Amino acid sequence: MEHRLLSVTHSTLREDNNLSPKSAAAVLSLITNPFTSDSTLSSLLEALVLRLHNPNSNSDHQKVLSLLSALSHHHPRLGHRIAAAAHAFILLPSTPTPSLPHALSLLDPAHPFQTDPFSDESLFLSLCFWQCVKTRRWILRNLSKFRVRPSVLITVLLGFTKDPYPYIREAALDGLVMLSNGIVVEDPSLVEGCYFRAVELLFDAEKSVRLSAVRAVSEWGHLLLALKGDKTQREWSDALFVQLCLMIRDTDAEIRVAAFNALGKIRTVSEDILLQTLSKKTLAATKEKKYPGQYTAKLFNIPATAAAFTFVHGLEDEFYQVRRSACHALQMLTVLSAEFSGGAVHVLMDILNDDSMVVRFQALETLHHMAMHDHLKVEESHLHMFFGTLLDNNGLIRSAARKALQFTKLQKLAMFRSCVNGLIKNLELYPQDEAEIFNVLYKIGRTHGKFVTSIIHEVSQELEPSFDGKLSFDKKRTAALLVLAISAPVSLERSICSIPPRIYSYAVTLLGRLSSGLVHVMDQNTLLAYLSHCSKFTVASTSENFEGELLNFDLKNSFTHLWKKSDAFSFPESMELKKVTTPVHGYLLNSHIKATSCVEIVLWKVVELWPLIKLRCMNDVVQTLRSWKEELRNFSCNSRHPAGVLGFALRYLHVIKLLGKAWACYFSQRNLQFTEMGVLEALLHKMESRLKEMLCRHAGLSRGEKLHILELMLVAYTLRLSCGVTSYFEDYINKLKNVLCLVEYLQKEGLVELSHFVNELQNISCEIGHSEDGFIYKLDRLQKSLNLFSLKHIVLSGELKYLDAEVDVCDNEFQNPLPFIPGLPVGIPFDITLYNISSETRLWITTTLGEKSAQFVFLDLSEFGGSNEMRRFTFLSPFFRTPLAKRFSLKVSIAMECLSEDQHFKHCNGPKHELIHLCKGKEVHLSMPVK
Amino acid sequence: MVIECLVLGAGQEVGKSCVVVTINGKRIMFDCGMHMGYLDHRRYPDFSLISKSHDFTRSLSCIIITHFHLDHIGALPYFTQVCGYNGPIYMTYPTKALAPLMLEDYRKVMVDRRGEEEQFSSEHIVECMKKVTAVDLKQTIQVDEDLQIRAYYAGHVLGAAMFYAKVGDAAIVYTGDYNMTPDRHLGAAQIDRLQLDLVITESTYATTYRDSKYVREREFLKAVHKCVASGGKVLIPTFALGRAQELCMLLDDYWERMNLKVPIYFSAGLTIQANMYYKVLINWTSQKVKDTYATRNAFDFKNVLSFDRSLINAPGACVLFATPGMISGGFSLEVFKQWAPCEKNLVTLPGYCVAGTVGHKLMSAKIPTQIRLDEDVQINVRCQIHQLSFSPHTDAKGIMDLVKFLSPKHVILVHGEKPKMVTLKEKIQSELGIQCYLPANSESLCIPTTHHIKAGASDAFVRSCLSPNFKFLKTNSAELDDSHKRTMPLLQVYDDRVSEGILTLQKNQSPKVVNQNEFMEALGVEKHEVKLAHCFRVYIPDSESGDASDCLPSTSRKGSLLHLISEKLCRELPDFDVQDCQEHIQIQSVVVSFCSNEKCPHRTGVSLQSVDKKEVHFCCSWSVADDALAWRIVASIKNLELDT
């Protein structure tokens, strides 16, 4: 079949007759059939080329060329040969001009031949001036293929703008637009010529010409502006602007869109003109102004009033494309003038009511843009519309609204309040927006610090725990308000931040939710640190006489400090802090954080107990403390020993209880009875040892935490000393001095500010100097110094590790004692587990028999394996002085040498420093073997 | 040729629009309205002015109705059925559909309520509508051999159109009522840029500049939202067509966006029926409605329910649309009586209320107030009142914009109040430079039109027209008068392919345009050119006079002298290209050369035999176009002796 067809076509192609439609169809069928063999195709190609080049084959070049282009299209690999044939054809002198465009379209301009027809100017011109309109249109539409001198191109194009055929005019204008992007014209009159020619065509009867003219006017207008000097440039850009404004009243929507697009590109327009675009009435400033241009087909001066109402017309347009384009142009132009923006806001706010989502979105984008340039002045009358978009049922719109909102500056508290209410309503209706809403709340809170403060004060009652002690944080409103509250301290205003710090501790409970909202600002750890930090400032809530300015300064500084500590954060002006937290990390953190946040709250709340303690309402205090302890213990239900922060908090609460009791005891009767003295001393002793334990058994205490504990120790010592009648007076003087030294050391290390109480003690100690009994004479001052003390909020800055130990003896019970022989040493096998104890720690096994002095065995930790977190080993410890008894029991425990304490103990071969027991004493029963 | 324009109604007034335009012998009646303010003969246009013989069918080519408002169509049944016009009538599809409703409604009111004598009956209306040919937008109708008409979208009400009419070369546009700003349910007027001799435009708001429609919408929505949010009921009395749909779309959209659940009711009756028409005629509504049509019909209001009487006193907030618009009676009054005493409720009033209606009383009243309906009934009004200011007419800027866009040669204003129309007329004339008229009723106006003559063209001429032949001219800014100086670009583009023909008019033959060469060939003449010449004497101071034996300067001296002159001319005429061609100097068409011919015919002044040897003669020739230039050159060369 294929061969038959081929032979038939071959014979027809060779003949000089015209190519009949039938044979052309046969050739085409061969070309399009994918199964036609290569040899057939190539012989077909040869035949076609031969016919093409044959000067006698008159007037069917077009047919052959279209067959060739079909061949080239279906079999691209033949493209090169076809191009070569077409090239040869073009160069033939016999080639008729009308066939040229078709032949040219077969060439590939990317692979120029030696004599490239595309760079042949005379060919180009002869095609241009050929009488066939179709040829002209083809050449104008394919201008970009030709490599002709721009001067020739521009002349041709400019000439064709006068063509009687609208399509040619349109194509010429498009060509001019294309040309304007690629050439540099230095002749102002030429540019002006092109510009005015395009302007003239703005009044063309054909709308496609007008559309192209708008683009051409815009492009050449900009070229013209570039050529004009500074002085006239402004006027010319106004002229261009007004000229384009004329087109926004065209009845064709596409032209209006193009006109607005062009308006948006103008970079300099005088404010008067811009203001005129918002007003229908002629403004005084533009009344008399006229610009070079064209107003109607006959009038060659364009009045500035032609710009009247431009943007309102655009925004009122029937077609959303026009409205969107107008909005976008506004976005570009509002940057130019604040006053113009002020006027544009009114219209834009109405656009928020538009039925088209696209337009609403663009309007919000424009508002956002204006806000970023600080040109957005929202008025009260706008609020209904503006905040209405927050409730839009389209998520994109809501998101854009929030985006616009976050930079918005609101002038009045009432406006801010309705803004916050709007956002809360948004949150209530569309909970899926929570993260973004929090983010926006945080951001607007930051820029409206004063308003935030007053709003939080208004609603603080809402934020408090309800009567049953539960914080209603599940309520969305509460959550939103908390976010707002936490934004205040980083407020960019120099306002007084007197938000009760407990709010921050409430906020901690929402850490997960908050941090997902503020993920662009800070990560979870930072947020936690920040919240803890903010909630530390107890002073603000308790003493309102505190100078707000000072606090603010302090707060900011320390906050900044806080940021800087974590190197991962940058601290740009916008305070956009971001650290990528992987979600897994965040998740792991979460359960831990619940406990941590609870601890935060409790530690925070403790501070509030201090006034109660001062009032000696110890029942309430004790009860509260107990309930808190229980609450905290809930978190550690699965671990025997509440470790870390939780354990620390529990111990801290215990210490506070002791302190409270002691304090109450001390102040209840100044002239203490001896019995009470005993009670007090006991309390103080307990407190002292607890404090010491806290200090020594927690690894990872920060300086602040240490200082806090030391201060409490000082209180204990001071209380003890101020009773006056204590048996170890000198001892305590020394202890006091030691602690003061430590405080001083810590202070020097980190430049921490000390409380008034500690300062006073330091002063006293300084005044006394080294005299031994100086304190006796300073008792008054010591007693008075106690009044300076107030409990402060202890902030746990990091992870704490509790040094712990367990000791056990296998299978040792009262019924199942270990055997021993009286008078002879006995080896006791201990199962020892150590937690968080580093190998440098000096550990002792203390063994006491009865009330007698103990026996110490040193544990060299380096001998045992395991990590610092946990070591478990068996250790055979000898006990030397077995009594002469049938059975006895020993008390064994593990103690740590407390290196910080300077007191020396006089144990032979025993510890040199004070010991802190790491576990409760374990009884070991020994008995003589029964024979 | 003239266009004659006879204004039968709406001349310097609003009401009974009717203009009869005669273009090249074709008579078209635009609109056939009635005046609602009169009950006597003034109610109808004075048709007798059209034809004394009352043979209207013959004297009018056609009637064109722009939209269904009674002041544009009210007199039509009377004119066709009573006065006996039997010719073609054109109107758009929606107008044809809705007009009978309006006419029937009006007839009922006239006959049933006021007990008036019937001007036309229901049958009349039906019969009249049978004569109507419905047209589509942008559909060109060939009324007869010469008359073409075409409808363009006017955006005034559903189906409102502007009409273009063309007879021969004369073309006009009659706008009817139109709106240049779109509203929720209708688009803005849309028309092509046409070559027009005349535009007859309405001018209802000839001096009003209306603010953005968004302000009105916002105020309306805010008032309604505030009312329903506080649990109040909103009564929106409207006319059945147009405003009801507009407001309802506005509310429906808002409801959806704000997730409001308060019910919106439509009182049964005409409004529902009208909604049905809107649904069917969706193509005549705004772009937005058309766009959403693919997914849902915008007139299928999502939140709208139909109302029944039992709901009037149902608890809770609601919005109710009820007819008639001015609370002049009917259902809206019934509901108003119930709702007015409650402060929480809201009543909106249309922009315009006829005196005597409850709406009119409310417009001027201060709340709270009491309104007396009749002897016995008095209503305590404590509810809030919101005045709507929506209008489907364009304002002054819109009229100006349309006129500017169409740029006709003449403008006639109708359908407005005279003093305002005068202001607008002044504005159109001064700002746009277009002649503007405002004829009164019964006045007739003639407007000259362009008239084109058909001419044949020779093949050679046609061929010469096919190829572009453009020319660039740098206009000399000095030649332009002051007003154009600033604006005219220096570079002008011309494409001369059409202008270079020659029109020949031979006896008994139609005019023909031929090519220049062809023309000369046909006449058998050669091309002649008129040239001017001038030969004059210049005294040349000679430095080497002693040697000069020859009375004529030597060739070399001549050359150097010419060179000298050309340099001088170069300096003095920097804008021109001075060509020094050894033997002569050429500047444009001016040729300057030495003249040795003692008897040169162009030589002026006394030619003395004993010529001073230091004298030289120059002969200049030029074509007429460069006359001014030539004399400048002559003067310049003459000055040579003074310089040296």
Image (cartoon, coloured by chain):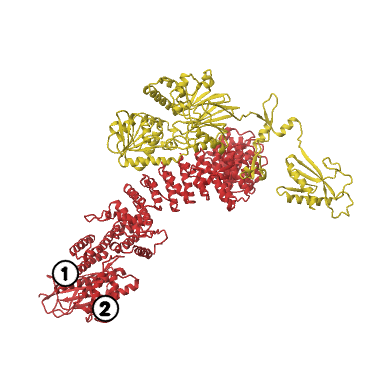
Chain colours: A red, B yellow
Percent of width and height locating residue A639: 23, 62
Quadrant the N terminus of chain B occupies: top right
Residue B372 lies in quadrant: top left
Q: Chain of mark 1?
A: A
Q: Which residue is mark 2?
A: A902
Residue B529 horizontal side relative to residue A166, left or right: right
Give the Cα distance between marks 2 and 1. Answer: 39 Å
A656, B406: nearer the viewer: B406
Percent of width and height locating residue A622: 19, 64
Q: Which residue is mark 1?
A: A811
Residue A253 horizontal side relative to residue B487, left or right: left
Check disc 1 and report its element: helix, strand or loop.
loop
Q: Chain of mark 2?
A: A
A659, A879: nearer the viewer: A659
Q: Are marks 2 and 1 on the same chain?
A: yes
A260, A538: nearer the viewer: A538
The residue at 89%/44% (across/down) is B609
Residue A397 horizontal side relative to residue A157, left or right: left
> Disc 1 marks which amino acid?
Asp
Percent of width and height locating residue A482: 31, 55
Residue A140 lies in quadrant: top right
Percent of width and height locating residue A439: 36, 54
Residue B595 horizontal side relative to residue B185, left or right: right
